Image (spheres, helix red, strand yellow):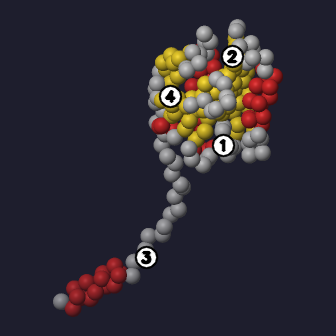
Amino acid sequence: MWVVALGVLACGVAWWIRPDDVPVPKPHGHVRITLPDTASTRYKSPCATSFRIPNHAKVERKVTPKGEVGCWYNLAFPRFNARLHCTEVPVDGRLPALLKDAQSLVFGHEVAASGIRRHALNEEGKSGMLYLLEGPVAAPLQFFVTDSTEHFMRGSLYFNHAPNPDSTAPVLARMEADVRRIMESVRWP
């Protein structure tokens, strides 16, 4: 009997003094991003320009600021917490000034950017440039498209949160494809 009691006591002491599990560090998790389908619909802007926009975008019309000409609107992407701010203005012989303004808005982010990639658009009746700014910049994607004589369209993508290039990379790749479709499908009245 005392042997059984001694055995139970030994098991109880062994259980009581067992070592704790050693904590193992785990890597930080990342948010899973599910990208919507790539379907698009033709949209006609307030300036009568038409182009294809992704079905997951919502158009937000803006009032043109006093003293300004053209059309101002946003393409909102609620799923990505982002907006593509778009402006359309008539060229009216100011093409060099409009190009300089578009480039200064891009290269104003050069301080924070770790690199700037460019993709040119050269099609009959229109040309343009898509800028992809790498690193923690406020507007990682900017573009312009023009017919060089009458119409000029410019856009900048902004996320509604602090830029984190690792987190936004898949979304930015998708947005690049969406903006290319917009640029390639632009038709002026």
Give the secondary structure at mark 1. loop
Mark pair 1, 2: CA separation: 26 Å
Disc 3 crowd, CA 10 A, few/some/many (<14, 14-19, 20+): few
Which badge, 2 or 4, comes first in the chain's sequence? Answer: 4
Amino acid type of the residue tagged 1 in the rendering? Ala
Q: Are marks 3 and 1 in contact (CB under 8 Å)?
A: no
Residue under the point 66% across and 25% down: 69
The residue wearing badge 1 is 138
- 2 or 3: mark nearer the eye: 2
In the visual, does 147 lie left or right of 37?
right
Q: In this picture, is 83 found above or below 16?
A: above
Q: Can you see residue 173?
A: no
Residue displayed at 71% across by 30% down: 131
Instruction: Look at 55% across and 20% down and name the residue there.
Output: 45
**Which is nearer the eye, 163 or 3?**
163
Q: Quadrant of residue 142?
A: top right
* Left or right of 73, for residue 151: right
Q: Which mark is residue 155?
A: none
Query: Helix or strand or loop: what does disc 4 sit on?
Result: strand
Q: Give the percent coordinates (x, y) of residue 141.
A: 66, 33
Residue 159 position within the rendered picture, expressed as x and y whole percent measured from the top left: 58, 41
Which numbered dot is residue 59? 4
Q: Which mark is residue 151?
A: 2
Q: Nearer the viewer, residue 103 or 114?
A: 103
Taking the spot 51% from the left edge, 31% from the top edge, the residue there is: 60
